[in-house]
Image (tube, rainbow, N blue to C red):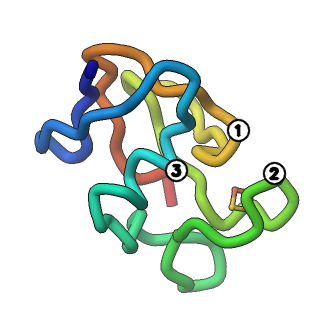
């Protein structure tokens, strides 16, 4: 099993697994601040709600439910 880093914490994932699913399996429910003062989280799972935005390796915010996990990626809350 490979791993990426969520706020510095290693998170294991399986090949073909999205960031959101791996975070969910690791019991991470709070993905950080989101637009409108909300809490980012895994909700729709299909890229529609924009509620699961995260940053990968310092890049622009992406939907964690659509983004495949990559080994050693550094994942942090989306930029809000
Ligand atoms: S959970 Fe809704 S866009 Fe990712």
Disc 2, SS: loop
| Residue located beneath label 2 in the image | 47
Q: Secondary structure at mark 3?
A: helix
Answer with left or right where residue 5 lies relative to residue 79.
left
Residue annotated with mark 3? 20
Disc 2 residue crowd, few under 14, some 14–19, many 20+, Cα 10 Å: some
Instruction: Kindly report the distance in space between the C-alpha atoms of the residues bearing marks 2 and 1.
Output: 6 Å
Q: Is residue 75 above or below residue 20?
A: above
What whole-number distance in Å separates the C-alpha atoms at marks 3 and 1? 8 Å
Residue 20 picture location, percent across and down: 52, 50
| Residue position for label 1 | 66
Kindly identify the residue that appears in the image at 25 percent across and 25 percent down: 3
Dot 3 or dot 1: first in sequence order is: 3
Q: Are marks 2 and 1 in contact (CB under 8 Å)?
A: yes
Residue 13 in percent (x, y) is at 36, 32
- Classify the position of ligand 1 by quadrant: top left, top right, bottom left or bottom right: bottom right
Ligand 1 within 8 Å, label 3 CB: yes
- Who's the residue at 82% across and 53% down the image? 46
In what element is the residue under mark 1?
loop
Measure the C-alpha gap from mark 2 to mark 3: 11 Å
Residue 29 position by quadrant: bottom left
Callout 3: 10 Å neighbours few (<14), some, many (20+)?
Answer: many
Residue in the image at 20% along x and 46% along y: 7
Rendered position, 15 above or below 10: above
Q: Is mark 2 within 8 Å of ligand 1?
A: yes
Q: In the depicted view, which residue is nearer to us: 16 or 65?
A: 16
Tell me which corner region of the image, top left, top right, bottom left or bottom right, holds residue 33. bottom left
Judge: label 1 CB < 8 Å from ligand 1. Answer: yes
Where is residue 38 drawn, in percent x and y?
56, 84
């Amino acid at each position: 099993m490979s791993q990426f880093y969520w706020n510095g914490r290693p998170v294991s994932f399986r090949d073909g697994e999205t960031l959101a699913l791996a975070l969910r399996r690791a019991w991470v429910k709070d993905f950080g601040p989101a637009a409108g003062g909300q809490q980012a989280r895994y909700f729709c799972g299909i890229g529609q709600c924009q509620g699961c935005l995260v940053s990968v390796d310092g890049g622009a915010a992406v939907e964690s439910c659509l983004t495949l996990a990559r080994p050693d990626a550094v994942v942090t809350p989306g930029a809000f």
